[in-house]
Image (cartoon, helix red, strand yellow):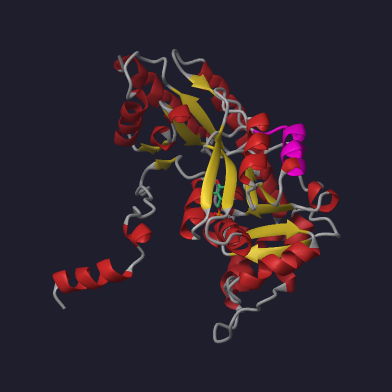
Amino acid sequence: ASDASTARVIAATIRPDVQALARYAVADGTQAIKLDAMESPYSLPDDIQAAVARAVGKVALNRYPSADPRPVKDAVRTAFDIPAGADIMLGNGSDELISLAIQSTCVPGDVVMSPWPSFVMYEAFARLNHATFAGVPLTADLQIDVPAMVEAMARLRPKIVFLAVPNNPTGLMWSADAIRTVVEAAPGLVVIDEAYHAFARSTSMDLVLSHPNVVIVRTVSKIGLAGMRLGYLAGAPAWVDQLDKLRPPYNLNVLTQAAIVAVLEHKPVLDAHAAQICADRDALIASLAALPGVTSYPSAANFVLANFSSVAAQPGNAARIYDDLKARGILVRNVGPMHPLLAECLRISIGTPDDNAALLAALNDILPTIR
Ligand code: PMP
């Protein structure tokens, strides 16, 4: 068929809002020091990698995966301290669980709410489900604005509220009081997204049992298993019964099912990597703050947000620094275009000590050239 005739059918067929979407862009990270996507810089040790290979090698590829993989749920429950009173639902990444939670709660026109800026997929999935997304701006110092959240929830009656704790792309943690106030004022479901919980000192897991409207979503992506594509949701059994209805029956492939069970037998290795990353994060925050004109925010995640607005008076510092870092093979994330509160901010994932040292050395070279 001619390109023009294909384009005509597409224009008449694909949803207009999908046609208007930009594809999810992922920068090419080959050969770079990759500090843009909150991955762990640590691959698994050879012996664990070999154990995974043995487990995966025994899998029956001719059969569909188990639709209710008990061994995976048991391994997740043990490894991540899911309380006995909660049920577990598994997702092909926590992205899938976020999408399913919106699909299960919202009919067209219903409201999805979150402090903002936060994880972009809350808004994207809301819009694709014809829900209205309401982002409640963070305060100038990037804290959750609890009174504004309470007011907005009373006015807009969101079916579902997402709280990323700690927040992406800022790294800040919300206090237990703030979380509880939002949960108790919410008219519907509150999904507490603890994607970065391994790098934070506290969890809201107890709210799953104490409050009627809370589920927790987490992922293994940030603790060294981003390639696995596994997220989990912990909630009261009655919530999981409902949310699980829309889950595609074979959403977790057999390879992931076999591999995660094998890896989680070695959970202390993942914990040691997370502890290393936390120590390196705290060191990097201090080093960044010592650079002239740079402000770094506190972080309870495996990345830090750095603000370059005082490096030079004119706008565009962060974009130039981003480009210069990239030219030196260091990939970070320029989050400035996301939201005015993030203007002149770069989000930097924690790498190995060598990666972080290379970043600091590069910034030391680049900053004096920005004026
Ligand atoms: N929630 C938050 C807050 C995130 O930052 C991310 C990853 N960027 C996810 C969920 C999705 O993680 P995954 O789909 O890899 O489990």
Residue 109 to residue 1: above or below = above
In the rendering, at what x and y percent does residue 181 appear?
A: 75, 36
Q: Quadrant of the C terminus?
A: top left
What residue is rendered at 73% in x and 71% in y? 71
* Quadrant location of the N terminus in the rendered image: bottom left
**Residue at the farthest bottom position:** 62
x and y percent of residue 287 in the render? Answer: 53, 20
Q: Where is residue 97 in the image (x, y as percent from the top left)?
A: 61, 60
Residue 367 place in picture, x, y as percent:
36, 18
The residue at 72%/32% (across/down) is 175
**Residue 151 seen from this side:** yes
Numbered range of the magenta stretch: 173-184
Q: Which residue is drawn at 61% across and 71% down?
A: 246
Is residue 330 shown left or right of residue 290? left
Is residue 203 visible from the viewing direction of this image? no
Examine the structure image and report whether residue 175 is included in the region drawn in magenta. yes
Q: Nearer the viewer, residue 117 or 36?
A: 117
Q: Is residue 346 above or below residue 367?
A: below
